[in-house]
Amino acid sequence: MKTGQTIHKIRTNNLTRYIIVGTILFFAALGVLLSLIDSITHNKPLDMIAYFTNQSNILVVVVLSLYFFNKQDEKWYRILSIVALVDILMTGLIYHFVINGIANIGNMSFNGQLVHTITPLLFPVFYYLLVKGVVTFKQLSFALVHPLIYFSFFMIFGGLIKWYPYDFLNPTLPNKSLGSVAAFSLGILLPIILVFTLVLATLKNLIEKRQTNL
């Protein structure tokens, strides 16, 4: 059976759809819950909202939950879904390749695996299988808003609040400066995110084109 036909079969089978969404939602929600418990236990409630990892995982939970309320055909839902996709994949890729290192993946806690590995791997399955419709450039632009605001906020206000969520955003560390952080974030990381987002959208549009040709 061709890929396009397989996706069509999944999309038209309610039981299969909800099993997929429910399974992914379980792992995503568990990761968010454990992160919340951890932040409360260590008396760091702001960690729950300050880290991009937690923000992206919460957004994934929201998107998956809304699917059960039959919002998947709304235009705003498709926009929210591509935002969540870019966010959660950024979370996984930046954590494993920039922050922690792919070689240390086996040393992570169970919750760390959930929010940095499992959910970033599972959510694209949901997005490409069950979120219908092509991605326009206008919709795609929304996917870049959250990362831009997040990085810009800490580059501008991190020095004032004297706290940075990630070392690669912290210009006060040895051998780093505001210029080097800005160069990395805007000159390297942002272009990579932009190209990465275009690739994700192109793949999505190819899949949806096959669906319309069935």
Image: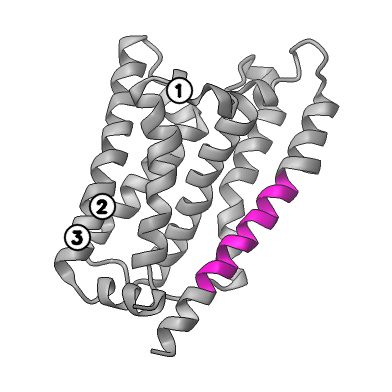
Q: Please provide the residue range marked out in magenta.
A: 190-205
Cα gap from disc 1 to disc 2, whole angstroms: 30 Å
Majority secondary structure of magenta residues: helix
**Cα distance, mark 3 to mark 1?**
31 Å
Name above or below for residue 197 compared with residue 147: below
- Horizontal side of 77 relative to 203 (left or right) equals left
Res 9 label:
none
Q: Amino acid at mark 2?
A: Ser
Amino acid type of the residue that numbered disc 1 sits on in the rendered structure: Gly
Compared to 172, does 83 lie above or below? below
Q: Which residue is mark 3?
A: 18
Q: Label 3's element?
A: helix
Q: Please say if 91 is above or below 43.
A: below
- Percent of width and height locating residue 28: 31, 40
Look at mark 1 in the image and give the residue it sits on.
106
Q: Earlier in the sequence, mark 3 or mark 2?
A: 3
